[in-house]
C-alpha cells in the first residue's frame, strides 16, 4: 500500500506527532508498504527530502514567534501544492495526525480524489492554552479549538487516539467511530546492552540515584512543582534530578533551581540523542512526570520499558500507565508534599524500587510497537478495500 502521513508539525520540532510517525512508518516500510509524509518545510520553499529514511514533502512555511522550530504553512497556493503532491504520490490511504492548516487543506483537496482518510488525535487544548492566565479566555479558546477539531475529524472514516482516556475525551465531539490504539514503544531499544559510564561522563551525572524527567520544557509539563518537591526531598535522601529536553521554560526552571538552592542537584542535559537516551533511562532510579496534558506519554512508557517506577500526576491518561503503589505512585497535581513522599520512598527503599520496576516493565509490554503496527495495518487494509 501507499500510505501518506499528514502532519502540521514535524522535524525539527520534536514532539509526539513526529515521534509517532517516526516509529510507525519505518516498520510499515519493512512490511513492504510505501510511506511518505506531508509537513511544513524548514524554509520558504517547497522541498522533498529524506528524513529518517522517509520521503517528506515540505510545504513552504514560516516560523512561529517564540517557537522557532514550530512552523506554519503559507496559505498562498497551499491547496494547489497539496493537489500536486497527492497526484505525484498517489496514496491508497491518508493518515492525518492533527486538524490544522495542512490537514484541513488535504481533506478539502481529497474530496474529488476520494482517497480513504483516517486520523489520529494527539491533541489536547492544554497544549495551546497553558501559557494563558485568564481562565475565561482558556475556556473560550478551548471551545474554539475543539470546534475546529470536530469540523476536520468528522469528515474522516475512522479516528484513533492513544488511550481510553483520550477516547472518552474526544468521542462526544465526533459522530465517527473512535478507537484506542497505543502509540507504541520499541521495547528492545530501552533495554540497551553495555554500561552507562560514557553517558554519565558526557552529561556530568554523578554516581548517585537519579530522578528523571524527559520531555519538552513547556508550560503544560508543570515541571516547577517537581523542582519544588526536589528542594525538600534532597534534604531527606541523596539523589539528583536530571531533566532531559528543550523548551521555552528552561531558563525559568534553571532560575527556580538556583533560587531554591538546589542548582547543584538539578542537571539540565538539553537535547539528548536517540543513541544516548536509553542509557539515561538505564542509569536512573525513577521516572517522574507532572504534565497536565497527556493522552498517553511516550517518555513515561520509555521509563516503564526501562524497568523504572513512575511517579505521575493523576490526570489525563497517566493513570492508565501507572497503577498507584504497584508500578509507581499517582499524586494530585499541586500536592508537593505527596511528591516528596513518593520520591523519598522509591529512592530510599531498594526492594520497593525493584518490585515497582518489574511491574513497569511487565505493563509496558502491552504497548509493544509491533502490536501498534499490526493494528494500523489492519485499519489501512480495511479502509482501502
Image (cartoon, rainbow, N blue to C red):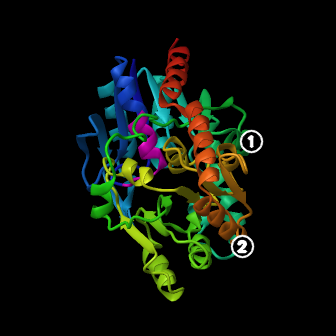
Q: Closest to the observer: 366 or 73?
A: 366
Q: Is 351 left or right of 217, judged from the image as shown? A: right
Q: Where's residue 203, x and y in %?
A: 32, 64
State how many labels appear. 2
Q: Main secondary structure of the magenta part?
A: helix
* Residue 81 seen from this side: yes
Query: Compared with residue 147, is residue 163 higher up or lower down, i.e. above or below?
Result: above
Q: Mark 1, mark 2: which one is toward the viewer?
A: 2
Q: Residues within 10 Å of mark 2 (few under 14, many from 20)?
A: some
Residue located 70% across and 48% down the image: 319
Magenta residues, as a range? 13-23
Helix, strand or loop under label 2 = helix
**Quadrant where the image shows the N terminus:** top left
Query: Compared with residue 5, is residue 243 higher up or lower down, i.e. above or below?
Result: below
The answer for how far apart the CA atoms under marks 1 and 2 are is: 31 Å
Q: Is residue 144 magenta?
A: no
Q: Where's residue 264, x and y in %?
A: 42, 79
Q: Closest to the observer: 259 or 379?
A: 259
Q: Which mark is residue 168?
A: 1
Residue located 63% across and 45% down the image: 355
Query: Compared with residue 154, is residue 380 higher up or lower down, i.e. above or below?
Result: above
Find disc 2 in the rendering and name its residue.
337
Query: Compared with residue 83, is residue 32 higher up or lower down, i.e. above or below?
Result: above
Q: Is residue 15 magenta?
A: yes
* Residue 124 seen from this side: no
Residue located 40% across and 70% down the image: 268
Q: Where's residue 151, x and y in %?
A: 63, 43
Q: Where's residue 143, x and y in %?
A: 70, 57
Helix, strand or loop under label 1 = helix
Amino acid at each position: 500500500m501507499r500510505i501518506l502521513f499528514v502532519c502540521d508539525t514535524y522535524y525539527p520540532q520534536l514532539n509526539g506527532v513526529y515521534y509517532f510517525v517516526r516509529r510507525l512508518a519505518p516498520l510499515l516500510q519493512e512490511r513492504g508498504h510505501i510511506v511518505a509524509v506531508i509537513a511544513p518545510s524548514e524554509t520558504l520553499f517547497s522541498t522533498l527530502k529524506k528524513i529518517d529514511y522517509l520521503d517528506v514533502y515540505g510545504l513552504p512555511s514560516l516560523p512561529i514567534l517564540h517557537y522557532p522550530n514550530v512552523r506554519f504553512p503559507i496559505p498562498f497556493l497551499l491547496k494547489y501544492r497539496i493537489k500536486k503532491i497527492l497526484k505525484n504520490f498517489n496514496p491508497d490511504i491518508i493518515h492525518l495526525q492533527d486538524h490544522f492548516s495542512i490537514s484541513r487543506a488535504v481533506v478539502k483537496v481529497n474530496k474529488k480524489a476520494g482517497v480513504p482518510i483516517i486520523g489520529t488525535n494527539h491533541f489536547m487544548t492544554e497544549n495551546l492554552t497553558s501559557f494563558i492566565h485568564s481562565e475565561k479566555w482558556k475556556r473560550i479558546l478551548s471551545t474554539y479549538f475543539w470546534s475546529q477539531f470536530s469540523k476536520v475529524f468528522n469528515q474522516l472514516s475512522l479516528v484513533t487516539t492513544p488511550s481510553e482516556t483520550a477516547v472518552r475525551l474526544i468521542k462526544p465531539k465526533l459522530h465517527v467511530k473512535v478507537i484506542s490504539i497505543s502509540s507504541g514503544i520499541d521495547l528492545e531499544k530501552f533495554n540497551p546492552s553495555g554500561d552507562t559510564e560514557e553517558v554519565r561522563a558526557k552529561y556530568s551525572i554523578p554516581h548517585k540515584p537519579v530522578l528523571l524527567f524527559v520531555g519538552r520544557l513547556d508550560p503544560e509539563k508543570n515541571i516547577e512543582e517537581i523542582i519544588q518537591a526536589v528542594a525538600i526531598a534532597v534534604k531527606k535522601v541523596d539523589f539528583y534530578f536530571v531533566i532531559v529536553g528543550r523548551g521555552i521554560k528552561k531558563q525559568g526552571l534553571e532560575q527556580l533551581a538556583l533560587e531554591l538552592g538546589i542548582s547543584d542537584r538539578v542537571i539540565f542535559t538539553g537535547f539528548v540523542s536517540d543513541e544516548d537516551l536509553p542509557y539515561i533511562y538505564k542509569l536512573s532510579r525513577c521516572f517522574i512526570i507532572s504534565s497536565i496534558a497527556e493522552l498517553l506519554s511516550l517518555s513515561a512508557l520509555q521509563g516503564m520499558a526501562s524497568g523504572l517506577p513512575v511517579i505521575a500526576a493523576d490526570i489525563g491518561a497517566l493513570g492508565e500507565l501507572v497503577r498507584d503503589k504497584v508500578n509507581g505512585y499517582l499524586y494530585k497535581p499541586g500536592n508537593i508534599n505527596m511528591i516528596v513522599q513518593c520520591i523519598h520512598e522509591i529512592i530510599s527503599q531498594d526492594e520497593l524500587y525493584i518490585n515497582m520496576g518489574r511491574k513497569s516493565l511487565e505493563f509496558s509490554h502491552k504497548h509493544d510497537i509491533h502490536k501498534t503496527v499490526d493494528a494500523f495495518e489492519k485499519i489501512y487494509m480495511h479502509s482501502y478495500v
